[in-house]
Image (cartoon, helix red, strand yellow):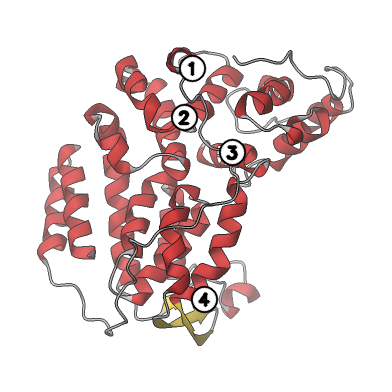
Amino acid sequence: MIGSAAGRAAAALAAAGCAAAAALMFALAIAPVPARAQDAAAPDTSAEIATPAPVAGLDLVGAPRRVRRFVRQLASEDAAEWREAQLRLALAGPAMLGALDASHLAREEPGRARVRTLLSLGMLTTLSSADVGRYPALYAVISVDVARGFVIAESLAASPVFDVGQPTTAQLMSHDAAPTEVQRRIASANSLGGFAVPAALDLLRDRHAVARAYGVLLLADLAAVVANDSLAPLESDLAPLVVGYSDTTRDATVASTATRTLPRMRELEQVPRGFELPVTLALKLNGSRDGSPDLLGGIRRTSSAASATTWDEWWTAARPAWRMWWSLAGEEPAPHDRKAWLDYQQGAGGPAVGRSEPAGPR
């Protein structure tokens, strides 16, 4: 399975014009996979998936005119406007890709960077690589990073032990201790955002238990809720594996990893967290190390967003605080003057607490 993944990654690199890297990847594709212990076969993933709990769902459903308007808004010079457009389009799913492709925003900066982050967020929440692949100009924006994800996945899958990347004793004793190779690889995958999801999904279908467990770990670290249905069958995957925790190991199964992960992943989709998750993910993709909980905290404290049941309701309530945040932050992921943000929440120098915009879609 991983060999074929390397082949797909090579094709992606070739399409992007990276001849040397593509040649390397084709070599990986035809090279024999390193010998690994014969694990139990991957479970049949064709079984019916149970109906999930109520989730936020797609945004802008059945609204092509609004989709086109948000595509135009993605080119705005106003940070609050283009960042809202980025989120709303990403959560609109495959239906928005045609309008995004037709806009040609990906041809040059700053549109290309905005489209890239939009697609990364979309591939964490609503899009597959196949969806994007139907639009060659859009796929060209992401192909190199998708291929890198497969290279990282290959290296993790070759491990005889499922090392979860916890800090070692040496790292706990000294902040100067270098990260382990596994920690570097996991961090590299996380830095790819949604572009690591295709490779992680491929790992879930690998015949080796360690590879499937790494697929679960990567998807959980990325908060890739788009993969929740694909994770569900692994809750019954009883293939044994050895798990590495810091400086110790223990026996476990793929199922034990999946059953700890999937409930938390499903909670991320449920209202109201389902409306907030894209904000956190987008902030991280745009450079915030912690997802800036200050923004969501301020939205909750100054609006009725927490009681929203639709995307339009959430944005109508959240937009005043959203606009204030970006007026203070500009092109940075968070305001430099945190006091100004706190003053806004207390009603000093900004709209009164609890004020929202008039109801109705934008």
Q: Quadrant of residue 291?
A: top right
Q: Earlier in the sequence, mark 3 or mark 1?
A: 3
Determine which residue is flagged by label 1. 70
**In the rendered image of this protein, does residue 218 appear above or below residue 162?**
above
Tell me which residue sits at (27%, 84%) in the image: 38
Image disc number at residue 176: none
Q: Amino acid at mark 3?
A: Ala
Q: Are marks 1 and 2 in contact (CB under 8 Å)?
A: yes
Image disc number at residue 256: 4
In what element is the residue under mark 3?
loop
Closest to the camera, between mark 3 and mark 1, is: 3
The Cα atoms of the two marked residues, 3 and 1, are separated by 19 Å
The Cα atoms of the two marked residues, 1 and 4, are separated by 42 Å
Q: Amino acid at mark 4?
A: Ser
Determine which residue is flagged by label 3. 56
The Cα atoms of the two marked residues, 1 and 2, are separated by 11 Å
**In the rendered image of this protein, does residue 68 appear above or below residue 155?**
above
Q: Amino acid at mark 1?
A: Phe
Q: Earlier in the sequence, mark 1 or mark 4?
A: 1
Tell me which residue sits at (16%, 46%) in the image: 11
Tell me which residue sits at (64%, 39%) in the image: 276
Q: How far across and down, in percent of the image, does residue 139 sit?
A: 27, 34
Instruction: Answer few, some or many: residues within 10 Å of disc 2's Cα (few below 14, many 20 plus, some between 14 and 19).
Output: many
Determine which residue is flagged by label 2. 92
Q: How far across and down, in percent of the image, does residue 328 sit?
A: 70, 23
In what element is the residue under mark 1?
helix
Q: Are marks 3 and 1 in contact (CB under 8 Å)?
A: no
Q: Earlier in the sequence, mark 3 or mark 4?
A: 3
Closest to the camera, between mark 3 and mark 4, is: 3
In what element is the residue under mark 4?
helix
